[in-house]
Structures are given as structure tokens and as C-alpha cells.
Image (cartoon, rainbow, N blue to C red):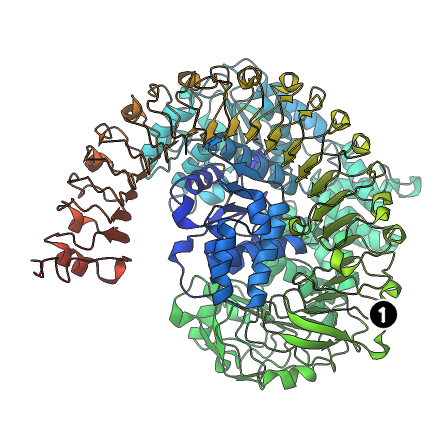
Amino acid sequence: MESVLASSAPPSGLPAGEYEVFLSFRGPDVRNTFADHLYTSLSRAKIRTFRDEEELRKGDGIAPSLIRAIPESKIYIPILTKQYASSKWCLQELAQMVECWNQNKGHLILPIFYFVDPRDVRHQLGPYQEAFQQHTQKHSPETVEKWKEALQEIGQMKGWHVTESDSQGALIEQILSEVELHLKSIYTLVTDELVGIDSRVEGVVTLLNLPSSEGKVIGIYGMGGLGKTTLSKAVYNKIYTQFDRCCFLDNVRETLTKSEGALCLQNKLISCILKKDNYQVSNVSEGINMIKERVCKHKVLVVIDDIDDKFEFDKILGKLGDFSLDSRFMFTTRYKRALDFFPECKLYEPEEMSHPLSLQLFSKHAFGMDNPPEKDASISEEFVKVAAGLPLALKVIGSLLFRRERKFWEEKLMELQGIPSTTENKVQERLKISYNELTHNEKQIFLDIACFFIGSHIDLPYYMWSGCDFYPESGIDTLIHRSLIKLDGGNHFWMHDHIKDLGRAIVKEEDIHHPYNRSRIWSIDDALNMFRNGRGSEQVEVLRLDMNSRDVHEKLLKSKDFKNLSGLRYLEVGYGSVIGDFSQVLPNLCCLRLLHCESIPTDIYTKKLTVLDLEECDVKDNWKGWNRIKAAAKLKAVNLPRCSQLTRAPDLSPCASLELINFEESGRMEGQLHIGNFKNLKTLRLRWTKITGLIIRGNDMGKLQRLEEMDLRFTLMTELPAGMDKISSLKILLLESRYRGHQIEIPRLPRSLKRLTISSSNGVPNLLELTSLESLSYLSGSIPSIPRHIFAVISFDELNLIYEKYSGPLSELPSIANLRNLTQLTLMHIGVVEIRGLGELRALKTMEISNFPNLKNLNGLENLLLLTTLSVGSCTVLQRLPSLANLMKLKDLEVCQCPILVQIQGIGEIGESLSRLTINSCYRLANLDGLLQLLGGLEDLTLNQQSFGGKPSPDLSGLINLKRLSILYSPHLTELTGLERLVSLELLSLEGCTSIRHLPDVSGLSNLKTLDLTFCESLIDPPTGIEGLDSLQQLLMPNCRSITRLLNLYGLKSLETLDLNSCIALTEVKGVEGLASLTSLRMCGCSSIKELGNLSGLKKLKQLDIEGCTKLTKVNGLEELDGLQILDMEKRMRVKYLAKSAARYGKGLASRFILGFAGAADGSSPT
């Protein structure tokens, strides 16, 4: 059951970028197959997903949209195919993902190894090795090494290894579940203990539990700030498991004010309920019909948040009576009359909190206890009265009064009592009393956050406020204690919607009609209007211009545009061009952020500059601004990541106030960095630069007593300065060798370290001294053993020991029994017979054991009761796994390349909980049929290079929940037994099954979306019943060399990709002209085909590949395909109208070979 908080956008006000998931793949490999299905499923789940169209990009750099989308996203999903590494753009993206992940472990990377061995990725073998041979010739060594290291990190991560036997539909479901689970952990309700919520929840649940005829619709109504949305979410979390499908439609009133708002709501509902259906309705009528046909039959829970009296259910969602009797609808609204539309609606009005509960909530914030002290009881009662039972008001007012003197309490009480009862916005007026009590500096910080920094990390705004003498340490603390803001676990700002609205309303009231006279301008339209009209005033203090979506002529800003903005202290320009000399303008500028800008000012004014952020800008060594920067006495943060034109570190030594230096991935930057003057330095990031050393007076790092983080991975440093152990503030140290044989001498390290990444070539510090250490990644390759003291550090919750393959397996592994706090363990390329102490790791949830050539048993595995993911690979002498019967939480089991494994014991006992099983190259595994019959809960099955005990097929009939089935490169497979029973199947892949000649009837597989028969060289005919597969989107049959005819394509109305490449015996294809959804038709090398149908009706076709169709002389309708982007055809093909087609398409046709119109084989010109 999907969670509302995972299947909908984050609750309003939570930190969120434009995207939640970043999907990376090499387009030609999976764009129209697996990647498209995954993107569709994520989109249907209302998960904002960035899909990179890699093949459309030009040039060498990452596109600006990617630069923004990658750090904004919470989850990264790279689909690593065999040719993924051949794309420099894919590798650039991957490196950026790993960088963001390393900087913020709140991000999650979920790699998908799509028909590629993770070990090939990790060690760049096979096709990855071939790709890097090409990259080495074209790109700098540091760039190539950076890409390799990113692949190494990705290859070590737990993901999904997709093989021919995997069911890709089931895999997508599993990925979707993992994404939703992670997002739900992010998007939890941002609230304190919900005083009094239980009784309200029970009140609503009681109404929902009425008989179907009475409790189908519940309306929660009341004034703003009463907690209606919070209540609806709490109810949802309590009951959602009782429904087949759930959906939370939030901000409905606001959505319906926008164009196509009704359509937006329909698409949200359909996407949420029908996660497996690839539909996007184009008009409201279609949406109503779609809801009636596909949504109403489910038992659904739908929360429709914040409707008004203009909301018309039947004109958006259809007739309420069409929905299942067991479905439930819950509305929230400020307008009781909005619920009059539903005569049968049961109403619930959350009463203003009862006096005792109000007093309890107030007391929690005013006194830090459930009840007021006796001496303050009377006045507390008065405050509770004026708060009128509104939770947000009680919280904010109580926080305002915390630890304040009696006189202050009395004054505030009088002020609140003076607010007229007829005031339209009672909540905002009551909240404003807390704002009024802030100091000037605190107000500035509050308004900045409300207008600009909700969801932003604290660091750069903090430095800016510090440079403006706003004293952010105490200011932020005050705002938190006043319950006006919060900081999430990643140090990002959060603010309640009502409080955000209060802040923005205060700014707008500065000048209702002229935004350019306000202190803050956050609207790009307001800002550009100001520049167009030559407006602006010294009142403007903070200005943001995100030019990413603007026209080119609007992106150019000149110094004269800012001449009237003398009061500006914060300027942020994204994706623009800022030109001219700024040395005489913006005299009060504290923070300059030019992000991904093609041009930057020739000079800047730096007297008050605190933050300089030129991320991925075209800044050079000879920039005139460097001389100004040296004079910036207040400078605290220099952020210059990915500045590719810099060849040396700028001389910042005069800037003694620096706290943050970030030169990451400025790959040409070399030399030594002087840090001796930076006694306030907290963060130093030099990853993937050519910096060779750190220079500090006396070579003593102990002088940097505020340093917390050092990222020195993949630099050219060979030693660290002495005195590292004296940096008592250091928490994170990341050191990895840039190349094999590269060594960094590591001195003694401080006890304060919490996270450490090292390579064995750097030496190993005494970890027993690092009593605070929580995470260790140890990459070994040059020493014969791993230091024993690693296994005595009981504080670890994550341990990754990777012994590199080229050095031969590690011969010894001490007992790991002491590592009782571990939740994640990765051990690779170790030559021991057993893993001693494994059974003591009772907190372990994820374990990967790989490349253990001598491992004979996994004793203790049966004790790991919390294990959810187990991967065992390349254990060449392992014959049996211990019984899995106790591992009731195990969801994902992967056993690969264990050639003499004969038995997996106890799998029947976990058959209902196990959802994914991958068996690859386990040639002696006995009774595979019997094993599969025990796995009734399995959704994803991959069998790669397996035999079936002398049978022509495994018996699949018991796998009734299976969604993804992949049987890959199994030459013994000659038929499929029980396929017709897999009615939930979404993906069927038989790639490389060269002996199968016939397939059973597939007409009953109504959910099938992908049928992959690649390299089924003996297959004579496509499966019977294929013409009835309305949902089929991908039909992949390349290298089916025995297929002679395809006669039954007419009914495939959803088909988007048809791949018939190298079907050399194919002479006839019928029904192509009816494939209205087709976007890609690939028939390269079909040397026997003589004609195609008329293609003029394929209006969605973007790619047509008929190169090598040497007998094809006619393609009717080609000139009418206006959407065609890629056209590959035979050089000698005589198509009379090809010149006319080329002239019509012009530059819009990205064809490699539009050949034939320049002259046919006989030298004649086309007509």
C-alpha cells in the first residue's frame, strides 16, 4: 500500500527542489524500454522525476538543467547498461551524483545494473574497459580517473542487477516501493508532539467506519490554522493499509485557480491510483471517463485537501456513486457550505482545542512542561483564551513568552486582547505579535527565510547574515525557539505555510503597487519588469533572478541595470550573463551568487562581501576580480566548484576570515594551497583537483581548531601536514588515492572523527583511537591483510571493505563479531574459508558478499533476523547456504556465479515475504522447479544462464504474483510452462534463449508492457495472441533470425517501440500502419524485407531505422512524418521523394544518413 506522503508531493513548506528523483541512462539503450517504463511509473506515483535525454545534448559540459536537477533531487537512479560508459555525458552525470551523495547522505543512489555485471562496472571490465580505452584518448587523466572512481563507488552500492530472467515490471514496482519508502522518511509531518490529535483522529475514523452507505464521504471543516490538513494526514496514516489504493490531493483550492487545474487534479488522482497504467488524460471529459472505467473499481481512500465552495466534484472526478461502496473520501475545507454538494457527507468540525489541551500545548512551549507553574496559572489561562484553541497560535505565542519577565507577559496579553474579533485573518494577526517582538536583525533573517530560503541549506545564508552583522547564531536560535522556523536533519530551513504567508505579506505591505520599492524581490517577473523600466531603489536588499526558463535576450544583465540598487546585500543570478564593471555599484553587497553563468562581471565591489559563489562559471586565473577578492576582509565563504578554466588556486591568503573553501571538480586547478591564515576554516573541499599539498606555517594543522570537514579525495597530495590529531573539531575526513600506486602519508588522526574514507595505499591509522567513528570505507589493494584493529571498533554502523581484484584476494579476515552495531556490511574479494563472527551482527539489514573464491560456508547467517537484502556472488566453492527460514524480513535475495551451489535451504518458509529473487550462473542448483513453487509472493524473478534439471522449462504456474520474469541466456529453455497463469506479468524477457522455437498463447497477459525476445534465434513465430495485448508498449525482437513474417500487429494500440533489427529472414510485416502510438521503429539489417505499409499515420514516430534493408525500395508516407527526428536508411535506397522530405524537415531532422537524394546508385538524381 502506497503512503500518501510518498505518493504525493511533499507537504507544503517542506524543503523540496523541483525534482525528487533524477533518472540517468544512455538513451539508445533503454530510452524506449525500461527507462520509459520506470519514468512512467514514478510519474504515475506523483514523484517528480527528471529524465535526462542524453542523446539530445551537445558539447562537452553538463547542461545547466542537469546541474540544477542533480543536487535538487533526493534520489538518483542511474541505469547502467553495457554501453553506459561510452557516453561522456552519462559519466559526467554519474560523477555529479556521487559527489552530491558524498556531501549529503540524505541523498540516495539506487543503481540499476541493466544486463551488466556490477563487478564490470566497479572495475571497468568488459564493455566498460573498452569505453575507457576511448575516453583515455579524448579526455584528461583526471577526468577519466574521476569517472572511474564514480563507477567504483556506484558498483559497490546495493542496487538491482537486471538479467534476462528478471521481470522488469516487478523490478520497477520494487524500485518504486524503495523510492516511496525513502521519500516518506523525508516527508514526515513537520510538527512537535501532536497534543490532542488522538481524540480527533478517532473521531474521524469513527465516521469513516460507518456502513458504506453512510460513511463514504467525510468533510473536515473549520477556520485556517485549526490543523485540518495535519488531522487528515494523521487519519490517513492510521487507516491507509485498509485500502487497495490511496491518494492525497493537496492544495486543491489553489490548484483550481490555475489554467487546466481540473485536468491537473484528474491526472494526479489517476496517476496515484493506477500506478501501472501509462495514461495522461488530455481533457476533462476524457479524465472523467478514465476515472469511471479504471479508478472506480478499486477500494480507494482519497483525501481532497482545502476545497472551497466553488469545488464541483462531478465536473472533475465524476459521479460519487460510481465509486466502490468500500471507498472513502475525506475533504478538508474552510467553508462548510463547500460540503453541501454531498448530501450524505458526514461532517467533522475539529473544535478549537479544549481548554485543558490548549493549556497543555501552550505550557509545553511557554514553560517546557505540560502544566503552568501555580503562580503563572492565571495569566496562562488568559493567553489560552485569546489563542482561541488554534494550535499554531498556541505554539507561537507560548514560544514567544518562554523565559520572559512577567511585565512582558502582561504587555503581550493586552496586545492580543486588543485584536478585534472581526479581524479577517485571525491566525495571521495572532502570529504577527511574535514577529513584532523580534529585533531588527531577527526580522531581517525571518523575512529572508520566508521569501527566499525555505528549503535552502543554512551555510551560505548564514555567512551572508553574519557579514551584514545580523548575528545569525542567536537570530536563528531565536526563530527556532519562537516556533517560527525549523531546521531539518540536513540543516535546511523549514517554515509553516501560515508563517511564510505572514512574512511575504509583510514585505508586500512595504509597497502594495510597486515591487521595486520593496526590500525583497523573489518574483522573476517583478525583477525583469524593474530592469526593463529602469526602476529599482535603494530599498531593495535581496534579489534573486533564476533565468533558466527565460529567453536569451532576457538573460543578459549589465552593470548599469543595478545602478539604483545601492542597498542590495544579496544578489543571486542563475543561468544568465552578467557583464560590465561592478566595482562602482552595489556598495552594500554581502553575498554574490552567480550560478552557471556564461559571463561574469569584469570586476566587483568587495568591501562588505562575505560570500562569493561562482559555481560552474567561466572564471579564469586572470580575472580582475581576484585583486578585489584579496581585499575582502569580511569574506567567509568561497564556493568555486566545477570552474574548469581555473588552472591554479586563487591566492586567498589575505582573507583571514574564511570559513568555507570549495574548489571541487575544478579539474585543472593545480599547485599548493595556502591555508595557514585560515584559523576560522570549517570546511575544505578539494576533491578532483590537482592540488599537490597544503601549506601552513610550521606545517602544523593543529592551528585550524575550527576545521570540521576535509574532502581530499583524488587530489595529487602525497602527505598531510602534521598535527592532524590536534584538530579536535574534525568530524569528516575523506582520502582516496587518485591512481594505483598513489600514496598519501596519513599522520595520527583526531578522536573526533565520525566518518572516514581511506585507501590502503594511504596507510591505516589506529582506528581504536577514533572512539567517535561511525562509518568506515576502506578500499584495499596493496597490502596482504586488513589491520585487525578495524574489527574492534564497535561504534561502526556501516563498514565497507573492498579489496581490489587486481591484487588477488585478501588471505585473512579477522572475526567481525565485535561489530554488533553494523546495519550495512560489504565485503569483496577476500580469500577466507568462512566469515567468523557473522552471526553476532544481529542489527544487520543489508549484506553483500562478493568474490570469495575459498568461502565454504556462511555460518551465522541464520541469526541475522533483521536482514532485508542479501547478495552472495562469485563464491566459487560454496555448496550450500544456511537455512533462510528465520529471515522473515528478507525481501531481496541474489545468488550469482556460485557454480557448485546445490541448495538454498529454508526458502519455502519465507516464500510469501520474498519479493525479488535473482539466480545467475548457479549451474548445479537442484530442484529449481520445487523451489519456485514455494515462492508465492515473488514479484521479480531473474534466471540467468540456468538449466532446469533436464526439463525444457521451469514450472512457473505457482508464481501468480509475478510481475517481472527474465530468463536470460539459457540455451536449455525450449518452452515456457505455466506462463498463461502469470496474469500480473508486466515484463517478459527471454533474451539470449537461443533454443526456444515457440511461445504459448499470451492473450491472457493483459498487463504485459514489455516483451523482449532479443537473440531468440530459433523462434519461428511471435507468440499467439499478441495482437490482443492492449497494454504492450515495447516489442523487442532483434536478431530473431528465424522469424519470416509478422502479420498480427494491428491491435497493438499502445505499442511505442518495435525493434526488429537484424531479423534477416523477415520478409513481411503487416499492421505497422495502425500503430498510432509508435515512436521508434528499428529494422536495421532486415535484408529480406521488401516493403512496409503506409507510415503516414504514425504521427508520433520519432525514429526510423531502415539502414541495411537492401531490398526495400519504397516507404510510403515518409514525407508526412513531421515529428521524425532520427532517420537512418540504406545508402543506395531509391526513394523518389527523399529530397522533398529532406527539404521539408530541414535542420530539424537529426539524421546520420539521409543518403540517396544526393545521387542514386546509378548516378541519377532523385525526382
Viewer-closest of 649 and 927: 927
Q: Image quadrant of residue 349?
A: top right
Which residue is tagged 1? 722
Residue 912, position as x, y percentages in the image = 60, 19
Q: Indicate whether 86 appears above or below 293.
A: below
Viewer-closest of 474 and 58: 58
Image quarter of the N terminus: top right
In the image, taking residue 1141 as reference, residue 314 lies left or right, namely right
Q: Amino acid at mark 1?
A: Ala
Image quarter of the C terminus: bottom left
Q: Image quadrant of residue 798?
A: top right
Viewer-closest of 964 and 336: 964
Q: Indicate whether 1027 appears above or below 813.
A: above
Q: Residue at x 29, y 21 (%)?
A: 1024
Residue 473, position as x, y percentages in the image = 78, 62
Q: Image quadrant of residue 231?
A: top right
On the question of residue 302 being in view, the answer is: no
Q: Indicate whether 872 appears above or below 931.
A: below
Which residue reaches farthest right? 375
On the question of residue 315 being in view, the answer is: yes
Secondary structure at numbered mark 1: loop
Q: Indicate whether 971 appears above or below 15.
A: above
In the image, taking residue 401 as reference, residue 329 lies left or right, namely left
